[in-house]
Image (tube, rainbow, N blue to C red):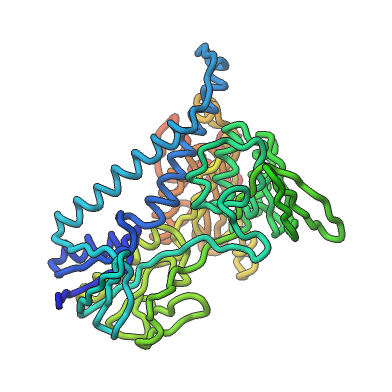
Amino acid sequence: MKEFDVAIIGSGPGGYVAAIRAGILGLKTALIEKDSFLGGTCLHRGCIPTKALLHTAEIYDAIKHAGDIGIQTSGASLDIAKVHAHKQGIVDKFSKGIGFLMKKRKVEVFTGLGSFVDANTVRITAAGGAAENIRAKHIIIATGSTPAHLPHLKPDGTTIIDSDMILKMLEVPKSLAVIGSGAVGTEFASVFASFGTQVHLIELLPRLLPIEDDDCSAQLERSLKARGMTCYTSTEVTQARVQKGSVTLTLKQGDQTKELEVAKVLVATGRKPVLDGLNHEAVGVKMNGRFVQVDEFLRTSVANIYAIGDVTASPALAHVASREGILAVDHLAGKHVQTINYLAVPNCTYSAPEVASVGLTERAAREKGYDVRVGKFPFSALAKAAIVGDPSGFVKIVADKRYDEVLGVHIIGPKATEIIAEAALGMKLETTVEEIANTVHAHPTLAEAMLEAAHGVYGEAIHI
């Protein structure tokens, strides 16, 4: 039986990064993956393919409006098969890249379903049924998540689909209902609106992107409606009747009901941890509801077993899983570690417009008792936003009046997911508004909105 210092179950952005880190530290490492390819959901069914589609949608939209800036185009059309081929080419390239990094760091890769035999032994069962056991001093659970389905809206793979299935859909439907306006639902709604689909975005809660700041949610709804999308909030889908070539949804808004007929339905109502067949509880790994219970070092209730990423209750984000993978490996290797400040983790939605945030919303800050001051600056006042033809949205800084500390930053508009990095670093360093206001920002850039929003906290924004 092969023996290792660490065995990692799952090769997503948590698992493969943990494996690389372990290899860098000189640990004998095994990486176990049930699929025949490396990279997990993020690379194959999530972050990367969706952003490839969003980039295509962005270019397609730009071409439609190229005449506004003096570029004459005609006959632009969408070849959905080539769109998917481009997307798959990117995915395949980076999946092979992960394989190369495993070899570089001397990580041994096993293909099969990993399950616990005991706290130091993992059984790996291949698709054909062949199995082998390996032993490891430490084991990291990094099995990720999968789309969660509603009992009355179970995907059939044809008319009702989930976020995995839609990535393989080689057609642009005439109409699409997206149920759930979190990042996944909003991003796919944005893609297909750009592709020419009549999109209906349906949210059970009172506003779109419910985890974001109220002002960002309100601006997002205005922007999506301006793009021709129909948005429903405080709306429950109570029934779905599938006919040939379409589906009729029953929507409940308060005491009122209505019907909506569409060609396709995307169910984007969240995700759930992948733990089936792992046999983790049998070896003493305790649960926190549906998640694996971990401490601040990502240790489970079994001292040598760690868990990272979507199987824990931390934010279900690829960049969180990667950071947790590094932290877990450093801890089990006996290195000094810096635990994660989850309040300083950025959230990003790559729709059009983009939305990004870090820290507390204005509502949350007030509920926590802070004496809140807010600075808000619109992209429409920036020359760079006018140059790139995307002047909608704003940067909003939420700050504590007493200590001038930045409590949260919320952005909706062009390149929001890139600009947020400055705010994330600032939050991690417990920056003040004054420090941002005194930092020289390059001109002309979109990031100047951050500078102006900082001045705006004091009512001293320059360009409005």
- Residue 84, given in percent of the width and then of the height, sits at 44, 37
| Relative horizontal placement of residue 315, taking residue 38 as reference (left or right) | right
- Residue 282, given in percent of the width and then of the height, sits at 38, 87
Q: Quadrant of residue 295?
A: bottom left
For image coordinates 46% across by 45% down, the residue present is 50
In the picture as drawn, the residue positioned furthest to the right comes out as: 255
Q: Does residue 22 show up?
A: yes
On screen, residue 2 above or below 460: below
On screen, residue 289 above or below 456: below
On screen, residue 73 above or below 134: above
| Relative horizontal placement of residue 461, taking residue 335 as reference (left or right) | right
Viewer-side residue, 391 vs 162? 162
For image coordinates 15% across by 58% down, the residue present is 105
Q: Does residue 336 show up?
A: no
On screen, residue 352 above or below 287: above
Viewer-side residue, 24 vs 2? 2
| Relative horizontal placement of residue 315, taking residue 119 as reference (left or right) | right
- Quarter the C terminus occupies: top right
- Residue 253, given in percent of the width and then of the height, sits at 80, 57
- Quarter the N terminus occupies: bottom left
For image coordinates 25% across by 73% down, the residue present is 131
Give the number of marks.
0
- Residue 52, given in percent of the width and then of the height, sits at 43, 39
Viewer-side residue, 47 vs 207? 47
For image coordinates 30% across by 69% down, the residue present is 129
Q: Quadrant of residue 339?
A: bottom left
